[in-house]
Image: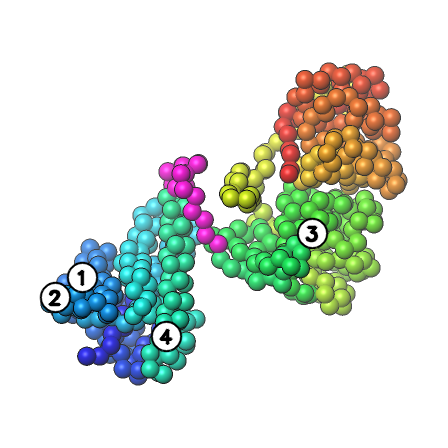
């Protein structure tokens, strides 16, 4: 009796040529619906599924392959006489090759206008069932879910049959495929019912890029992207020039994009080791770059830049003078690209900044033995809701600087302090074990940059005592923004009042660990 293959695919890429190869290798093909039609039109002989099962497709195609003559042919063990006898008794023929890919559930739910009914009808039942049955029986059955594997399977069939090693490889791929498919369905339905903390968290990601190494050269690493891509993300940025991204590049680029998302005016973010070293805004992207560079012309060396406006020639010529790892922007003028691409290793990337998303989609961080999940820190805040707790009100210029500094400080590792004016960061104190230590670092940087005069200060969390305010006052800070909430808030307020500076409470904390 001829060996049989069952083919039922939504993605018909290469399936006609593959089916012809199966026939040439001596296999008889069972097929269904649109796949059968495509093969028939191409002159590939096929058996209809109902010719095998004795039952017609029914219920709008919901039931067609869920039948013992299909699953018996897939699951029956060839090495067990009892299985083979049962197959003979009930007229079940072995199926040796299964070629299935699934209803386009992912593509369906990505459509903005998708309805619940459309989504549900694109949940495949028969396909995953056949895949799982065949993959369980990999000792005898080759199951192909990816058109990229067609050539391998044909080559082996033409040389006497698929190998056990290949069948195991294909089976593992099948279960990854169906697990990812089920994860998308689970996620969709979980969101549909509004479940915030499901008892099981099922996630799926697609391999974006194999990396040369991780944080250090002895660590292996890879970059996976969301199966449902996020438009405004490093995963969706298009690389135009330069070396492959590294693990650290990707983490830094992500951090810089999060900061750039805060600003609508022309803005440049310079970032190093997950912390901004300069943020600048201006009337033009060149002016914004000038401010960002002046904020810390030392630390920017070897860093990355994100600009939320196209890079023009004048700005590119200034950037070209530095050693940079990455520049990300909506686009590069032709002349600007020519200047920057003269550096062969500099990574130039474009991203659609109009798609920046301020949703509270969750972010995930791995820990030993588990995963932390939280909403992104994208709380919509209004400066008019802030409380001035000192006798002196901030001036108009100081208020603009405070708003700028508050947007910046939430993206600095805690304990975080940002000294700024209305156009740029002037000094950044990041990740110190005590808050006054961060204050001292930020103010020292601002002094060295010549940007301390008239500057304001932002703290990501409250001051536990008055020492930070006293140090800031002693160095000329004119206004402070902080969440408030310490049992010793009054000491900080009194220190500010005594010095005649303004202090504003936002009542929102922005730790970033």
- Residue identified by numbered label 4: 163
Q: Let me know if residue 66 is in the magenta part.
A: no
In the image, which is nearer the foreground, mark 4 or mark 1?
Answer: 4
Number of the label disc, if any, that sits on residue 306: 3
In the image, which is nearer the foreground, mark 2 or mark 3?
Answer: 2
Give the Cα separation between the discs numbered 3 and 4.
Answer: 50 Å
- Residue identified by numbered label 1: 68
CB within 8 Å, label 2 to label 3:
no
Q: Let me know if residue 200 is in the magenta part.
A: yes
Residue occupying image coordinates x 72% and y 38% = 431
Q: Nearer the viewer, residue 88 or 479?
A: 88
Assess disc 1: are there few (<14), some (14-19) or many (≥20) residues with their C-alpha within 10 Å of its C-alpha: some
CB within 8 Å, label 3 to label 4:
no
CB within 8 Å, label 2 to label 4:
no
> Left or right: 299 with respect to 407?
right
Marked residue nearer the N-terminal end (1 or 2): 1
Measured as percent of width and height from the top left, residue 41 is found at 28, 77
Residue occupying image coordinates x 71% and y 48% = 273
């Amino acid at each position: 009796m001829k060996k049989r293959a069952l083919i039922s695919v939504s993605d018909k890429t290469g399936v006609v040529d593959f089916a012809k190869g199966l026939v040439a290798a001596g296999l008889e093909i069972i097929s269904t619906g649109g796949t059968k039609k495509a093969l028939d039109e191409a002159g590939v002989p096929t058996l209809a599924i109902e010719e095998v099962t004795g039952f017609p497709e029914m219920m709008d195609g919901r039931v067609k392959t869920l039948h013992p003559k299909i699953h018996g042919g897939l699951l029956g063990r060839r090495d067990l006489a009892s299985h083979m006898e049962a197959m003979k008794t009930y007229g079940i023929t072995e199926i040796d090759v299964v070629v299935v890919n699934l209803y386009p559930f992912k593509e369906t739910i990505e459509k903005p206008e998708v309805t619940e009914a459309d989504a549900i009808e694109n949940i495949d039942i028969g396909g995953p069932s056949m895949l799982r049955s065949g993959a369980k029986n990999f000792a005898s059955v080759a199951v192909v879910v990816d058109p990229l594997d067609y050539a391998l399977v044909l080559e082996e069939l033409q040389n006497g049959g698929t190998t056990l090693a290949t069948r195991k490889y294909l089976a593992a791929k099948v279960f990854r495929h169906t697990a990812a498919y089920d994860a998308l369905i689970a996620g969709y339905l979980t969101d549909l019912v509004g479940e915030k903390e499901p008892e099981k968290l099922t996630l799926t990601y697609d391999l974006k890029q194999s990396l040369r190494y991780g944080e250090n050269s002895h660590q292996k690493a890879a970059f996976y992207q969301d199966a449902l891509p996020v438009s405004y993300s490093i995963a969706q940025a298009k690389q135009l020039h330069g070396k492959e991204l590294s693990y650290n590049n990707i983490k830094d680029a992500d951090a810089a994009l999060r900061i750039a998302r805060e600003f609508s005016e022309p803005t440049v973010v310079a970032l190093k080791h997950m912390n901004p070293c300069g943020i600048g805004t201006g009337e033009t992207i060149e002016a914004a770059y000038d401010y960002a560079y002046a904020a810390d012309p030392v630390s920017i060396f070897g860093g990355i830049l994100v600009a939320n406006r196209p890079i023009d020639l004048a700005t590119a010529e200034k950037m070209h003078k530095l050693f940079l790892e990455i520049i990300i922007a909506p686009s590069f003028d032709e002349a600007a690209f020519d200047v920057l691409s003269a550096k062969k290793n500099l990574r130039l990337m474009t991203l659609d900044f109009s798609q920046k998303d301020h949703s509270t989609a969750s972010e995930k961080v791995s820990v030993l033995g588990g995963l932390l999940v939280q909403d992104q820190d994208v709380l919509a805040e209004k400066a008019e809701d802030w409380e001035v707790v000192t006798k002196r009100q901030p001036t108009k210029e100081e208020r603009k600087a405070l708003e700028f500094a508050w947007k910046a400080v939430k993206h600095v590792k805690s304990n975080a302090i940002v000294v700024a004016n209305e156009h740029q960061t002037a000094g950044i104190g990041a990740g110190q074990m005590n808050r006054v230590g961060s204050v001292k670092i930020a103010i020292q940087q601002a002094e060295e940059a010549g940007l301390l005069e008239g500057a304001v200060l932002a703290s990501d969390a409250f001051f536990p005592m008055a020492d930070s305010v006293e140090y800031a006052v002693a160095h000329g800070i004119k206004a402070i923004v902080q969440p408030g909430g310490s049992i010793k808030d009054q000491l900080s307020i009194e220190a500010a009042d005594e010095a005649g500076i303004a202090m504003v409470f936002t009542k929102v904390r922005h730790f970033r660990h």
